[in-house]
Image (spheres, coloured by chain):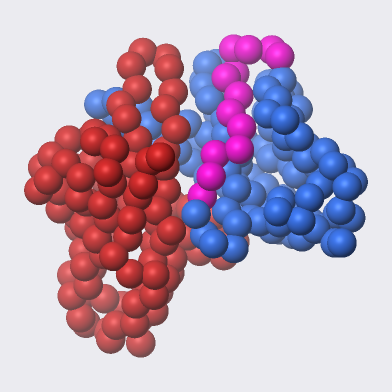
Amino acid sequence: DVKVTQSSRYLVKRTGEKVFLECVQDMDHENMFWYRQDPGLGLRLIYFSYDVKMKEKGDIPEGYSVSREKKERFSLILESASTNQTSMYLCASSPPVAGDSYNEQFFGPGTRLTVL
Amino acid sequence: AQTVTQSQPEMSVQEAETVTLSCTYDTSESDYYLFWYKQPPSRQMILVIRQEAYKQQNATENRFSVNFQKAAKSFSLKISDSQLGDAAMYFCAYRSDIIQGAQKLVFGQGTRLTINP
């Protein structure tokens, strides 16, 4: 079974703190993703990575950065946390797709971050 | 930009009955993938079903089936014989792009499904 784990289920931080959210997958997947989930907005893609040290902006990258030093680990960084970054953060991984095929994205359990 | 719209924030159904969740999307592409994901209270998102746009036949997975209307850009999920374990948030998603083998998904707002015993 594919397993995607996230370092914390719940996290409370103060405004201005630097926050690290960690994600680890055990299936040797090339692709990893960070989403945030908000009521009424669904999931929105923040950043993704298709290889070690490679990253691409998603739809809402402002205020975030990412790091992928090892294939199995993808970190989301909030350089200076703000209250509007209070949200649920979901990590996902998948194998690469070729041509017109598809591959399932496997999700972690999420981290509910509260910024006070 | 592609968008996905789920117009029903909440739905409820009696156990053993059938429920349909709606999803519409906007795209100018002719070939694409659509997905339904389930997020139970445990928060672990699970893929329920997928549909390839070039296939006219509606996808089916056990009690889950879709009604894919390409011209209308509609992709609804039908759950038959609803069970208590079906209670979850359901998200419709569209594959918008592939970059270096990584699929970008666009999700709808979600529909929270309650099953009444």
Q: Give the quarter of the figure containing the C terminus of chain A.
A: bottom left
From the viewer's perspective, is A11 left or right of B73?
A: left
- Residue A67 location, x and y as percent? 15, 53
- Residue A112 location, x and y as percent? 42, 71
Question: Magenta stretch: residue B53 in it?
Answer: yes
- Residue B95 location, x and y as percent? 47, 31
Foreground pick, A46 / B117: B117
In the rendered image, what is the letter of the chain coloured blue? B
Tell me what residue is drawn at x 85 percent, y 42 percent: B81
Tell me what residue is drawn at x 21 percent, y 64 percent: A77
From the viewer's perspective, is B84 left or right of A12?
A: right
From the viewer's perspective, is A110 left or right of B101?
A: right
Tell me what residue is drawn at x 52 percent, y 22 percent: B32
- Residue B54 location, x and y as percent? 59, 12
Q: Is residue A53 visible?
A: yes
Residue B65: quarter of image: top right
Residue at far front of view: A1
Foreground pick, B100 / B37: B37
Question: Magenta stretch: residue B95 in it?
Answer: no
Foreground pick, A55 / A7: A7
Above or below for A55 versus B116: above
In the rendered image, what is the letter of the chain coloured red? A
Above or below for B19 versus B29: below
Residue A97: quarter of image: top left
Q: What range of the chain is rendered magenta?
A: B45-57
**Numbered-mark total:** 0
Q: Is residue A54 visible?
A: no
Tell me what residue is drawn at x 54 percent, y 55 percent: A42
From the viewer's perspective, is B9 left or right of B102?
A: right
Q: Give the quarter of the figure containing the N terminus of chain A.
A: top left
